[in-house]
Amino acid sequence: MVSVSIIGASGYSGGELLRILAQHKKIDDIAATSRSHAGKKFSEIHKGYPVPEGTFTSEEDLEADFIFTATPAGVAMGIANKMDFNKSKLIDLSGDFRLPAKVYEAWYGIKHTAPALLSQAVYGLPEINRAKIKKAKLISNPGCYPTGAILALAPLLSKKLITSPLFVDSRSGYSGAGHQPDEWKKKAESYGYFMPYGIPKHKHTPEMEKVASEIAGSEISICFSPMLLPVFRGLLTYAHAALAKKISQEELDSLYKEFYKGEQFIKLFTDVMPNIKRTDFTNNCEISPKLDSRTNSVIAISAIDNLVKGASGQAVQNMNIMAGFREDEGLGIIDKCGP
């Protein structure tokens, strides 16, 4: 049994963490911090979710076995500097430990105050980095867009079958923006807008390029186009790339099947397309690679729940690996809950 602390627990990712941890059989204590909702019950803020009983506090618990930071950019690095990593392990859901300091500062516009910890941070994409995750004390949980894109492209990158630049088009539910009252988010909630944003300099672009380059063993550049869907949750990704050599659809399917052999959260499709409704409230990633022989290119399509596999579910999956629990512990489906 382990204790857990969630810092920044009143946002969408915090609500998902509370929901998942409520059904986790290996958790014996949950502390949750919210500066804006201290003193309120979890259920008052996360209405409709099967969250555990408890009250938000303003005091950060830095002595739990596992600490999750679901905080705005720049906050987690300050928390990490105060931690004792011999007693606690950190899983950061923000982007504070995903990039080298200079790259982070250039894309986020924030001074990195914990550069010494960057070398210890392990990128928490289990299907790619499971062995390193097992030994880690600091996990940089991937962003939702990079999760969908990298899982769609990883088999091709690993065999150097695609050439740079890659083109990634992603459609996300508006929950990916968090609780902040941005104008476009209000429009999406009220009027069903479908529109692009963050082009051409979305903060997830360098994260995608860094991980894709590591898998490929060579520098990969990515043209990334994020778009807002008029739904609350879900993330659909279309990754387009030119093939470095001729390949058949059968060979493509076999490549993905072999690469993801034994991965319980990867669902490969050949006859139907990935669908965000099937991934709702699950930690699954649906993937379908499609060959376009006319242009000698491939379109790799993926679907995830941006709040689960794209954030909190993947964070718990990482915790399970680090703690030696069953990897799917706490990650069962809960129907008809949340917004």
Image (cartoon, grey):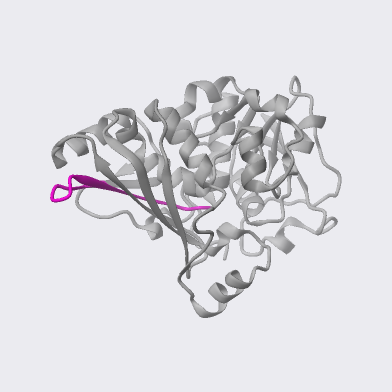
Residue 242 percent location from the top left of the image: 26, 43
Residue ID at (68%, 50%): 52
Residue 295 percent location from the top left of the image: 17, 49
The verdict on residue 163 being magenta is: no
Residue ID at (31%, 30%): 259
Say left or right for 252 vs 38: left
The verdict on residue 305 being magenta is: yes
Say left or right for 84 vs 143: right
Read off the magenta span: 289-306
Say left or right for 87 vs 312: right
Residue ID at (58%, 26%): 322
Image height check: is 337 above or below 101?
A: below
State whether the magenta stretch is mostly helix, strand or loop: strand
Residue ID at (15%, 42%): 249
Say left or right for 276 vs 1: left
Residue 2 percent location from the top left of the image: 68, 30
Residue 11 visible in the shown view: yes
Q: Viewer-proximal residue, 291 or 79?
A: 291
Residue 231 percent location from the top left of the image: 48, 67
Image height check: is 300 above or below 316?
A: below
Q: Viewer-proximal residue, 74 or 330?
A: 74
Outermost residue toward the bottom?
191
Total marks drawn?
0
Q: Quadrant of the N terminus?
A: top right
Q: Viewer-proximal residue, 263 or 252?
A: 252
Residue 332 visible in the shown view: no
Image height check: is 299 above or below 97?
A: below
Image height check: is 133 above or below 285?
A: above
Q: Quadrant of the C terminus?
A: bottom right
